[in-house]
Amino acid sequence: MFRQVVAALTVVLANVGFADGAPLDELVAALNLIPLHGAPAEPLALERLADGKVVALPSLRGRPVLVYFWATW
């Protein structure tokens, strides 16, 4: 039930945001988004849990990589 209320509220607020006639470009600019599509990944080096070896992202160029950050909070 809670998810349905949140979803309905999101739809209503999204429609209210577009109802004032603000162009989409202005709305996107107001969000201060950083476009990442097509941009190179930031340098990243992480320690492997298996052996403690540090692996840098550039050393994996050309291979599929999944970086999964997990937290318990």
Image: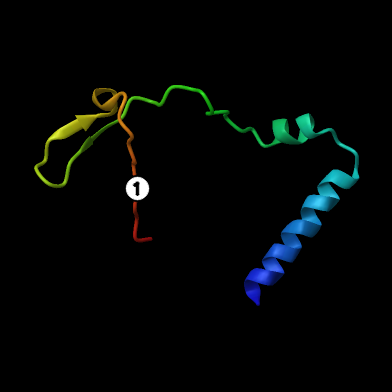
Rendered view: 70 above or below 18: below
Q: Amino acid at mark 1?
A: Phe
Position in image of residue 41 (x %, y %): 41, 26
Along the horizontal axis of the image, is 31 left or right of 43?
A: right
- Please give the name of the residue rendered at 75% of the width and 63% of the height, measured from the top-left corner: 9
Name the residue at the bottom extreme: 1
* Quadrant for the N terminus in the image: bottom right
Residue nearer the viewer, 73 or 19: 19
Quarter occupied by the C terminus: bottom left
- The residue most toward the left is 51
Quadrant location of residue 25?
top right
Residue 2 on image: x %, y %: 64, 74
Residue at image x 28%, y 23%?
58
1 on left or right of 41: right
In front of the other: 66 or 33: 66
Q: Residue at x 9, y 43 (%)?
A: 51
Up-down relation of residue 57 to residue 31 (above or below): above
Secondary structure at numbered mark 1: loop
Judged from this view, the residue extending furthest toward the right is 20
Q: Is residue 29 above or below residue 11?
A: above
Residue denoted by label 1: 69
Task: Judge from the rendering whether residue 52 lies leftward or rightward of residue 29; answer left or right.
Answer: left
Q: Residue at x 89, y 46 (%)?
A: 19
